[in-house]
Amino acid sequence: MAAVASSFSRFSFRCAVCPSPLRVRFSQPHPPARLRVSSTVVALHKRNPKRLKYAAERQFTSLWWLGFARTKRGDAGLLRVEVEPSGGDFWKLDPIIDLINRGAVGVIPTDTVYSVVCDLSNNESIERLRRLKGIGDSKPLSILCRSLRDIDTYTTGFPQGTNQGQANIFRVVKRAIPGPYTFILPASKQFPKQCIKHGSSTRYAKRRQVGVRIPDDPICQAILQNLDEPLICTSVKYLSEDEWILDPVIIADLYEPLGLDFIVDGGPRIADPSTVVDMMGANPTVIRQGKGLKLDWMVAKDEEEDEAQSMFSFKSA
């Protein structure tokens, strides 16, 4: 009996010190409910890192006459967006598209120099653009087109050629665009009439001709392809000098006090405007030589004048 009692006591002591494995529980304690809720909230607010970064930079305030959203710089406001020509951050152009559709006047880069642009059909925006540049109603304005379809819509098109030997200019023009050329063509009925104001009176005049461009610039094309129609444009120059401004920082400093709404910063440009080709006459005539080369189917203005003078002399003789 003593031996049995001794073995039983040893067994009881062993069970007390080292319990049976069947009684051991390895389940981990649950984390506090507060931590689980916190992680869920973070997951719900997770967003695209690019959008999150851009949203932090866009500290918009309400605007004046049209209620735009723009960044605040001192007493005036100007939305300035820096974009890489490579196209990796073209998502930054979304607010620019919205501002243009609302009637804003701003500056964008092209394949030549910077241009002041606005909506083609917004007469109030066009009037603001003219006041900002200090140009009158008689100054012609060009349009930045998205494709040849826009040119066909707002002009009567390029000469197609005839059986009488007239050259088919349209075929050779397609090789030059997109590019640094402005072609002057007859305006079609779809081209909006020009709003001319004299004091309290307002009249609308039909535009007989218009300069059209399809720039070979990825930033400019990214903006145009997200719009419903072309943009009215004119090059950016110093207010008192006939010289182009190539630095977007200087453009912002000079034109912001005048009411410029936005600027797309695509880096400095070269002082080389577009080549202007007049398509209204018998021959495509270069009336301003710029970045675009004079092609073999174009004639210089001096050459056309010499040809006209020789024809006049021949008829007189």
Image: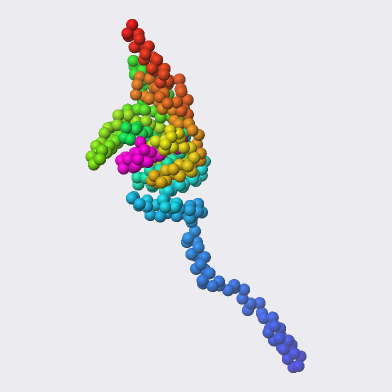
- Residue occupying the far left of the picture: 201
Which span is picked out in magenta? 113-135
- Image location of residue 173, percent across then percent down: 42, 26
**Left or right of residue 11: residue 232:** left
The answer to whether 27 is drawn above or below residue 167 in the figure is below
- Residue occupying the far front of the picture: 240
Q: What residue sits 66% from the left and 79% below the top?
A: 20
Color style of the picture: rainbow
- Image location of residue 275, percent across then percent down: 44, 28
- The quadrant holding residue 17 is bottom right
The residue nearer to you, when weighing 266 against 237, is 237
Q: What residue sits 54% from the left and 72% below the top?
A: 32
Based on the picture, tell me whether residue 133 belongs to the magenta stretch.
Answer: yes
- Residue occupying the far right of the picture: 3
- Image location of residue 250, percent across then percent down: 48, 42
Q: Quadrant of the N terminus?
A: bottom right
